[in-house]
């Protein structure tokens, strides 16, 4: 029986990995395809808006993890009711956040040299549409229905690619973003159709919070806030290089770098599949099983990273120009450094998410140690070009990992000395 369970786990994980990788490829192809439709400056604007979206939506991943945690901890009906409460609060929160975003749009537009103000209205809609997508996906993942998540991801990615390319040809940057929004909405519809279970109701978001719901949120408030801070901080780092490039360099130079960064993001998205496989299989009562999962995941991450970086090194003279066009050529070394940065970030994110699902406070420590030096480094040591920018970010990220290891070592030694156990 145990062998059958193990074989079933590997079969479902492999199928989910295949679907997720397919979705990642489609999401990735959108960017090099758009470099053929948009100018480098326009592409830089598109990449910057998508980076801002990813950084804001990174906070939402905390609630994806919360959904997984609630499904694993509570019976079906109770878990769904509790997830509905979180979904309700999130929708109202993001309604307010999108309003603030639109108010701040002129300042951001000027600072990042973004030409079309309509892009910020589309960004606001992207944020709102992401709430049910993230909540429902986490709910399904908590039930270990990874294949359904993979199918919906492929459908959404395919729709984004098709609509973004068509609309970009018609309306430029705003059209490309509108295509991404259309594909995201269709992905939500697919999730609803194939879920095979009662999902948290959107209609419940209209009603006000009851006293019991308020009490539940109060008990979970610390965990949610800690998760949001940790996940948000790590999410911001994924595209912080694009934002810094837009702020520090000319629109043309930042546009070229945005394309290179997007190429490196392919490795991030592929590696991220491991995180969801691990989290879906984590158990609350079997630490040995969990540690074995982590070891396997990091081994696979190392193999994928080594293969990708080796391929980039061998093809460094032609790869970026072949995939993105001649305007993006001569960036092979920058691409290698950017890929190493993304791998190091995935490594930190994997362990932080694992700690969050188990409700370990160390997740916040890890996120803080990694985020603070990485986010601050380019401001403290202004880079001379985009290659120096991504190298600075990589070194700062590795410094954060080292700092976390030192703090954990000291913490563990003090705990052992005092005979106490700490999270």
Image: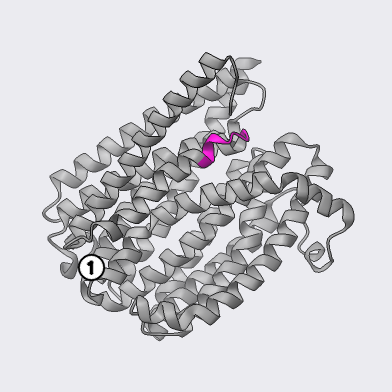
- Residue at the (20%, 67%) spot, across then down: 325
* Image position of 190 with respect to 227: above or below: below
Q: Quadrant of the N terminus?
A: top right
Q: Which residues are magenta?
A: 358-364
How many numbered discs?
Answer: 1
Farthest-out residue, right: 211
Residue 73 sits in quarter? top right
**196 or 49, which is in the foreground?**
49
The answer to whether residue 79 is visible is yes
Residue 71's place in the image compared with 373, above or below, is above
Q: Nearer the viewer, residue 375 or 353?
A: 375
Instruction: Classify residue 105 as left or right of residue 65.
Output: left
Residue 215 x %, y %: 83, 49
Q: Quadrant of residue 200?
A: bottom right
Whether residue 276 appears in this view of the structure is: no
Q: Nearer the viewer, residue 41 or 16?
A: 41
Q: Nearer the viewer, residue 123 or 266?
A: 123
In the displayed structure, 413 sits above or below 112; it is above
Q: Which residue is mark 1?
A: 256
Residue 281 part of the magenta-drawn span: no
For residue 210, side relative to residue 356 (left or right): right
Characterize the local packing of mark 1: few (<14), some (14-19) or many (20 or more) Cα atoms within 10 angstroms. many
Residue 359 placed where, x, y %?
63, 35
Up the image or down, 230 lies above or below 4; here it is below
- Whole-percent x, y for residue 227 in the image: 59, 46
């Amino acid at each position: 029986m145990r062998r059958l369970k193990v074989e079933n786990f590997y079969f479902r994980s492999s199928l989910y990995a295949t679907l997720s990788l397919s979705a990642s490829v489609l999401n990735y192809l959108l960017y090099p395809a758009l470099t053929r439709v948009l100018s480098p400056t326009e592409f830089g604007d598109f990449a910057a808006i998508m980076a801002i979206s990813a950084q804001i939506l990174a906070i939402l991943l905390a609630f994806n993890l919360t959904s997984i945690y609630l499904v694993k901890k509570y019976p079906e009906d109770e878990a769904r009711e509790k997830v509905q409460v979180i979904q309700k609060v999130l929708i109202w929160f993001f309604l307010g956040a999108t309003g603030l975003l639109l108010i701040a749009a002129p300042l951001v537009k000027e600072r990042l040299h973004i030409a079309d103000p309509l892009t910020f209205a589309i960004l606001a809609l992207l944020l709102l549409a992401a709430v049910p997508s993230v909540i429902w996906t986490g709910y399904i993942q908590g039930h270990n229905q990874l294949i359904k998540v993979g199918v919906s991801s492929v459908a959404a990615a395919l729709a984004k690619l098709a609509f973004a390319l068509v609309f970009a040809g018609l309306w430029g940057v705003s059209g490309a973003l509108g295509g991404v929004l259309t594909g995201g909405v269709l992905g939500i519809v697919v999730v609803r159709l194939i879920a095979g279970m009662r999902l948290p109701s959107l209609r419940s978001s209209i009603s006000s919070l009851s006293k019991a719901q308020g009490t539940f949120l109060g008990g979970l408030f610390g965990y949610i806030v800690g998760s949001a801070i940790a996940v948000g901080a790590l999410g911001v780092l994924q595209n912080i290089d694009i934002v810094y490039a837009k702020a520090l360099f000319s629109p043309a130079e930042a546009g070229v770098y945005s394309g290179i960064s997007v190429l490196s993001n392919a490795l991030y998205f592929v590696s991220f599949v491991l995180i969801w496989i691990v989290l879906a299989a984590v158990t609350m009562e079997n630490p040995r099983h969990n540690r074995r999962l982590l070891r396997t995941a990091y081994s696979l991450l190392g193999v994928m990273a080594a293969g990708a970086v080796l391929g980039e090194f061998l093809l460094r003279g032609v790869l970026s120009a072949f995939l993105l066009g001649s305007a993006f050529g001569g960036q092979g070394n920058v691409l290698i450094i950017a890929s190493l940065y993304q791998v190091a970030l995935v490594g930190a994110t994997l362990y932080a998410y694992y700690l969050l699902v188990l409700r370990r406070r160390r997740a916040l420590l890890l996120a803080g140690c990694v985020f603070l030096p990485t986010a601050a480094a380019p401001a403290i040591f202004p880079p001379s070009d985009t290659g120096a920018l991504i190298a600075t970010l990589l070194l700062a990220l590795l410094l954060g990992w080292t700092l976390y290891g030192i703090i954990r070592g000291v913490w563990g030694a003090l705990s052992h000395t005092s005979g106490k156990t700490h999270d």
